[in-house]
Image (cartoon, helix red, strand yellow):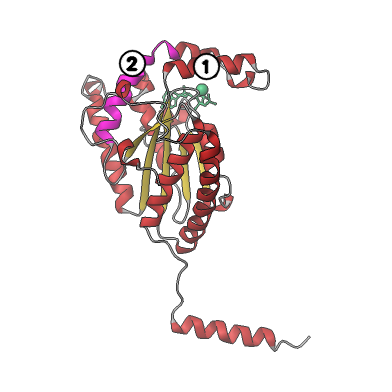
Amino acid sequence: MINHKKYFVKHNEKLNLSKISTSDTNGLKSKKDAESKLTKNIKELAELQAKLYAQDKYAVLIVFQAMDAAGKDGMIKHVMTGLNPQGTQVFSFKQPSKTELDHGYLWRINNSLPEKGRIGIFNRSHYEDVLVVRVHDFIKDQKIPDKFKNGKIWKQRYKQINDFERYLYENGTIILKFFLHISKEEQKKRFLKRINNPTKNWKFSEADLKERTFWNDYQNAYEEALSSTSKSNAPWYVIPSDKKWYARLVVSEIIIGKMKSLKPDFPKLDREKLKALERAKELLLNESK
Ligand code: ATP
Ligand code: MG
């Protein structure tokens, strides 16, 4: 097990992303070292999911946020393979639609929450409303009263998000949030790969290049948002992600650790129900053709 406590963001403690390694691999040297562990973890996750589904008491919400090309899609694909699709829901949040903008920013989030027994994955999330919206001052386009459109809005939103996530937690949704942390250099490498490899061309958009020029603004917005909203009931983890195989391994371990702590198990039947099973068995076995 990797000691993942070091990736946990402490609430309201000043976070300096430039001081956090993007390439840490905790002593693991290569993809090979991680692969067998990840395969094992994926199997374990599938078993835990089956119990979570049968138990039907908790939902698990996993949030992924990152700069472009940090590997959100690959993370979701790799870590979630092997899970029962019926028990998993993935939502990607893009620029809000006109209808979405007619509501508060948590409306579309609320509509996409995992049901009990299920694992919900957010590819981007309500955090965009304190990240991209802050970096580009999109707040001016949002339909909120003018008196709230001032510098205090981000702190207000952190509070709203903390309250919202606490409400989810107290109603049986377990929340884990991951920031996939890459270096600016690694992003450049990955963009160039997308440009140079015809099978990856579709992944590249010129808009990504424009966003890259706001790198520092994004890092600052992330630092404040993560430390203001990392709570024990909805923790943020900063995951070193220059090595995708390492990021996937760490994330799988954190999810497994959390799910195990819920002690999910198949529901035990009471005596009445066990008797009913016996009766059903007898009926089936004695069925005349
Ligand atoms: P990919 O890795 O495939 O590029 P992506 O998550 O970047 O995936 P895109 O369709 O490229 O998906 O981009 C979605 C864009 O929508 C992002 O730039 C994101 O910042 C933006 N977005 C998400 N939520 C909001 C929001 N509430 N307000 C404004 N923009 C948002
Ligand atoms: Mg994109």
- Across and down, in percent, residue 254 comes to 40, 45
Q: Main secondary structure of the magenta part?
A: helix
Three-letter amino acid code at the position of disc 2: Asp
- Across and down, in percent, residue 164 comes to 30, 42
Q: Residues within 10 Å of mark 1 (few under 14, many from 20)?
A: few
Give the secondary structure at mark 1: helix
Disc number placed over residue 273 in the picture, else none: none
Residue 120 painted magenta: no
Name the residue rendered at 22%, 28% in the picture: 155
Q: Is residue 122 left or right of residue 231?
A: right
Question: In front: 13, or 88?
Answer: 13
List the residue tagged with mark 2: 217
Q: Is residue 148 left or right of residue 195?
A: left
- Across and down, in percent, residue 138 comes to 36, 18
List the residue tagged with mark 1: 189
Q: What segment carries the magenta color? A: 212-229
Furthest-right residue in this view: 289
Name the residue rendered at 37%, 51% in the picture: 173
Above or below, 256 relative to 250 = below
Three-letter amino acid code at the position of disc 1: Lys
Q: Quadrant of residue 23?
A: top left
